[in-house]
Image (tube, helix red, strand yellow):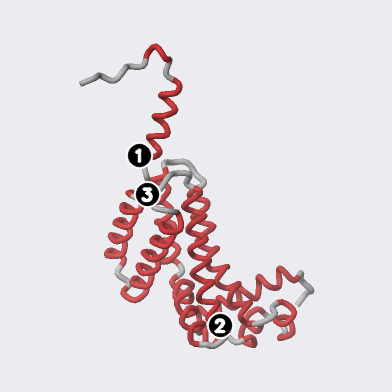
């Protein structure tokens, strides 16, 4: 195999690890099976990663980015905050349906890490990464929420995580689609329209000429 840069080699090994995990399961994703999938020598792994734990952390980051990048693109487009929320949920869900193996791997990774001493931090960092990603997306909307961003992010991850796991086990598209729509409606209801409208009203009041203001009536 031609000599390649370290960053590119790491990326190829991570994608190879994901393919092995999707096909054979996390437990069978040994360093030898991963380098074989990538078409590299075993030494390439040790040149690229300090440990298997580091590889697994990169796998989680990469799978998260596969869905996060799509959502970022949606939220950066035109439309109201409400429309963007629903479109982002739709985008995530389309990725789940198109790539069930990747999402199944995320749950398997959690359990694998929790059952192996020394890897428990991976499970914690996995969900920390999810919450951080959700927080970034929520803040990018530029609207006020009825709860602090970390709380909304945890709510969002809890709902989507449970819904994804349910679909992976049931495969009931219609029921999950209905539940996703309900989740979208509730998430949109958490946008603090009063704060947004209040800010707009304050601006309009400041712009209003002094002489045109109507004094409140007295009782």
Residue 160, x across and y down, in percent: 39, 64
In this picture, residue 209 sits left or right of residue 6: left
**Secondary element at image label 1:** helix
Q: Nearer the viewer, mark 3 or mark 2?
A: 3
Say which label, 2 or 1, has the lower sequence index: 2
Which residue is farthest right? Answer: 3
Residue 141, x across and y down, in percent: 47, 46
Mark 2 Cα within 10 Å, few/some/many (few <14, many 20+)?
Answer: some
**CB-based contact (under 8 Å), mark 3 and mark 1:** no
Placement of 179 over or under 27, stated as above or below = above
Calculate the distance from the C-alpha at mark 3 to the C-alpha at mark 1.
10 Å
Q: Which mark is residue 194?
A: 1
Mark 1 Cα within 10 Å, few/some/many (few <14, many 20+)?
Answer: few
**CB-based contact (under 8 Å), mark 3 and mark 2:** no
Residue at 50% over, 44% down: 77
State the image quarter where residue 98 is shown. bottom left
Q: Which mark is residue 146?
A: 3
In this picture, residue 29 sits left or right of residue 88: right
**Secondary element at image label 3:** loop
Task: Look at mark 2 in the image and give the residue it sits on.
Answer: 119
**Secondary element at image label 2:** loop
Residue at 53% over, 66% down: 129
Calculate the distance from the C-alpha at mark 2 to the C-alpha at mark 1.
45 Å
Residue at 76% over, 69% down: 5
**Which part of the image, by quadrant, shows the C terminus?**
top left
Q: Which mark is residue 101?
A: none
Residue 168, x across and y down, in percent: 37, 73
Q: Nearer the viewer, residue 152 or 84?
A: 152
Q: Nearer the viewer, residue 101 or 147?
A: 147
Residue 138, x across and y down, in percent: 46, 52
């Amino acid at each position: 195999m031609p000599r390649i840069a370290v960053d590119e080699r790491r990326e190829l090994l991570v994608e190879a690890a994901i393919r092995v995990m999707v096909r054979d399961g996390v437990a069978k994703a040994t360093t030898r099976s991963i380098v074989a999938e990538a078409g590299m020598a075993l030494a390439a792994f040790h040149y690229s990663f300090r440990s298997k734990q580091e590889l697994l952390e990169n796998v989680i980051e990469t799978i998260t980015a596969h869905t996060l990048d799509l959502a970022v693109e949606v939220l950066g487009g035109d439309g109201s905050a409400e429309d963007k929320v629903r479109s982002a949920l739709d985008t995530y869900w389309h990725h789940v349906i198109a790539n069930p193996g990747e999402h199944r791997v995320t749950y398997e990774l959690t359990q694998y890490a929790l059952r192996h001493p020394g890897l428990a931090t991976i499970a914690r960092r996995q969900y920390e990464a999810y919450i951080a990603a959700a927080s970034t997306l929520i803040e990018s909307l530029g609207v006020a929420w009825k709860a602090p961003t970390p709380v909304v992010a945890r709510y969002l991850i809890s709902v989507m995580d449970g819904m994804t796991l349910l679909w992976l086990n049931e495969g009931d598209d219609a029921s999950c689609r209905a539940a996703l729509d309900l989740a979208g409606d509730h998430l949109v209801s958490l946008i603090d329209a009063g704060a947004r409208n209040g800010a707009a009203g304050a601006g309009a009041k400041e712009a209003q000429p002094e002489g045109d203001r109507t004094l409140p009536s007295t009782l």
